[in-house]
Amino acid sequence: MNLADYQGIWVYIEVKDGKVAPVSLELLGAGRKLADKRGTELGGVLIGSGIKELAPTLFAYGADVVYVYDDPIFAHYRTEPYMRALLHCCQKYKPEVLLYGATPTGKDLASAIATDLPTGLTADTTILDIEEDTGLLLASRPAFGGNIMATILCKKYRPQMATVRPKVMKALPPDPTRTGRIVEERIELREEEMRTKVLEVVRQTVKKARIDEADIVVAGGKGMGSKEGFQLIHELADVLGAAVGASRDVVEAGWIDHHHQVGQTGVTVTPKIYFAIGISGAIQHIVGMQNSELIIAINKDPNAPIFQSCHYGIVGDALEIVPLLIKRFKEEIPKLKASADAKEEIRHA
Amino acid sequence: MLHIVACIKQVPDTKVAKINPKTNTIDRASAPAILNPYDAHAVEEAVRLKKRYGGVVSVLTMGPPPAVKAIRKCIELGADEGYMISDRAFAGADTLATSYALAKALEQIAKQRPIDLIICGKMTIDGDTGQVGPGIARRLDIPPLTGVNKVVEINKEKGYAIVHRKLEDGYEVVKSTLPCLFTVEKEINDISFAPLPNMIKAARYYPTIWTANDLENVDRKQLGLKGSPTIVSKIWTPPKPKGGEMLEGTTEEKVEQLLSIVLEKKELFQS
Ligand SMILES: Cc1cc2nc3c(=O)[nH]c(=O)nc-3n(C[C@H](O)[C@H](O)[C@H](O)COP(=O)(O)OP(=O)(O)OC[C@H]3O[C@@H](n4cnc5c(N)ncnc54)[C@H](O)[C@@H]3O)c2cc1C
Ligand SMILES: Nc1ncnc2c1ncn2[C@@H]1O[C@H](COP(=O)(O)O)[C@@H](O)[C@H]1O
């Protein structure tokens, strides 16, 4: 393998309900920085059915070139046809780096591509950098067991591939005047030869606000003591109109289901306010919430690592403090609402 | 009669593992070795399918000799046969080299008894990538079905499986040809209590153990560290953030300070 043949930073563009998935726009933002540092092009690979018109969006968010595979066979994500298309694209145009969102689809596709090419794949990266002169990708991720990070390299194979969690990177502000090249590609795929078929897609709307979209997240940890103690987290969230988050240990204890887990193996959240209550602050948790605008920690251990990663901290017993908070918010929030309504009336008068 | 193989791994229990502050690596002596929790669900599902359709459940692991313990745990859960590949040549494998070695072992198992279905866990709690399962499927050229949270039907005569695959906001119903490979979510089942006869069988169980030499047509260059494109270049502790401002005073005073900080973001509470 001649490493110099491989050029350009690429992002696999995930499409959901006819739109570009937010994580792909975030990766274009991250990819743009890598491409500029390396002095090379940023490419997006767009696979789907009726998706060609999404290319301008990708240019606006930083792409220089978009490779398009548009065919009805790609109507639903399936490993086999998507993999064939992406392999074709990699073999024909030889990117130096290929990034994927660490979503169910991105992980599935990346694992298959890594095996077939073959090349190295780093999972759940949280920090990306590139060596300007060699093009070596420095992909860092939290590593097992504690507050450590590992930087992973793939020296001898190309492309260098990584999956990156949603909401870890930042999308650039879109520039609608940016344009780029569209490269349309086709491969021969026959539906009769596909070994999997999607029979039905069932959407389950979650009744509570989705935790990754909520403005306020109240998250509780093992420090709440018990499933009953954890009820206080639900109550505080209710009063604040917030979504409920949890540490992994809480999920494993069965106090709440996995949808609520924040962190490396859960959801990444970036709310306006994040409460971490009775959460120790292990790196795997921190990576899932560190980009929140305002982080408030309550913990009875003054040395808990969470206090390193918060904006405001309270040392104390959550089982005592949270009920007080609930009571006081219950009193104060209606007053705020009332004053807002009053102002509204004045404006209408 | 189905032949289902679950791929399982023994992992350090990262919940109790300590980090050696000097080397920044996991202190293995501090961590009891356990069956990867996600793989217990893979074995449980295989055993349930065996009860539903009849068949044999085998488990396969790659690991050092003490990993026999994890196989015994699977026998307790109801697996019939255990296979282990163990050799220094496998050491230091990343996901690509791991899936290569496991695929070779699966080919060998299939020669003795053809395999209809392979089940892997969603991920390991030490490697934590979820890449090995799909990697095995690609190497054996069978369809990978990731994120399976329900098995609707397995029909060996007609050669298909129908499952639910978990999506971010729901699930999809997928039909695949057999053989294929599932990676399963935790919620697919609850682990059953091991019945006493299984425990007795497990205590005395010895799996079939193969070294690299016992596997046919193995390209040694693809094994272990040599066969791993990724390397860990450094392990580091992220710089400690400055830390937040600590609110002081009596509990009531701290609560009031917090209240005013939060309520400053008025717009969040006024709609
Ligand atoms: C591969 C891997 C992936 C992981 N992924 C995730 C992930 O996605 N998300 C995640 O959260 N974790 C994850 N973890 C686990 C993580 O390492 C921690 O074990 C976990 O976050 C700890 O949860 P906790 O803070 O609730 O519990 P603990 O660490 O037990 O902390 C409890 C805290 O509560 C405090 N406390 C106790 N009583 C009270 C009280 N009355 N009032 C106030 N404070 C109190 C204690 O001082 C302590 O700080 C992962 C681990 C590994 C190895
Ligand atoms: N050494 C191993 N031996 C057997 N199976 C493994 C091994 N490593 C990983 N697996 C399987 O692959 C799955 C995903 O592992 P990972 O990619 O490490 O997260 C696990 O849940 C296991 O089913």
Image: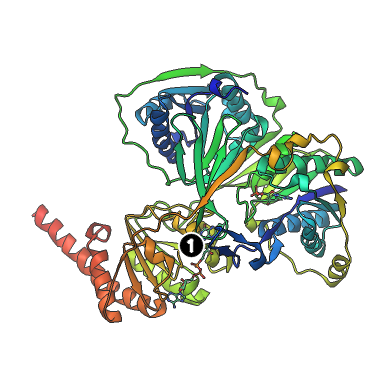
Q: Residue at x 49, y 63 (%)?
A: A247
Q: State which quadrant residue A38 falls in.
A: top left
As rendered, which of A138 and A218 lies closer to the eye? A138
Task: Write down the residue under mark 1.
Answer: A282
Quick one: quadrant of the C terminus of chain A?
A: bottom left
As rendered, which of A145 and A340 lies closer to the eye? A145
Where is residue A293 shown, x and y percent of the image? 32, 55
Model colouring:
rainbow
As rendered, which of B27 and B138 lies closer to the eye? B27
Where is residue B162 shown, x and y percent of the image? 71, 44
Where is residue A345 shown, x and y percent of the image? 13, 58
Relative placement, left or right, of A236 versus B124 is left
Relative placement, left or right, of A262 versus A187 is left
Q: Is mark 1 within 8 Å of ligand 1?
A: yes
As rendered, which of B162 and A133 lies closer to the eye? A133
Where is residue A202 shown, x and y percent of the image? 56, 45
Quick one: quadrant of the N terminus of chain A?
A: top right
Q: Residue furthest right?
A: B112
Q: State which quadrant residue A286 falls in.
A: bottom left
Q: Secondary structure at mark 1?
A: loop
Kind of residue indicated by mark 1? Ala
Query: Is residue B11 at all visible to an observer of this figure?
Result: yes
Q: Residues within 10 Å of mark 1 (few under 14, many from 20)?
A: some
Query: Is residue B144 at all visible to an observer of this figure?
Result: no
Number of residue marks: 1
Up/down of A133 relative to B82, above or below = above
Up/down of B4 relative to B252, above or below = above
Q: Chain of mark 1?
A: A
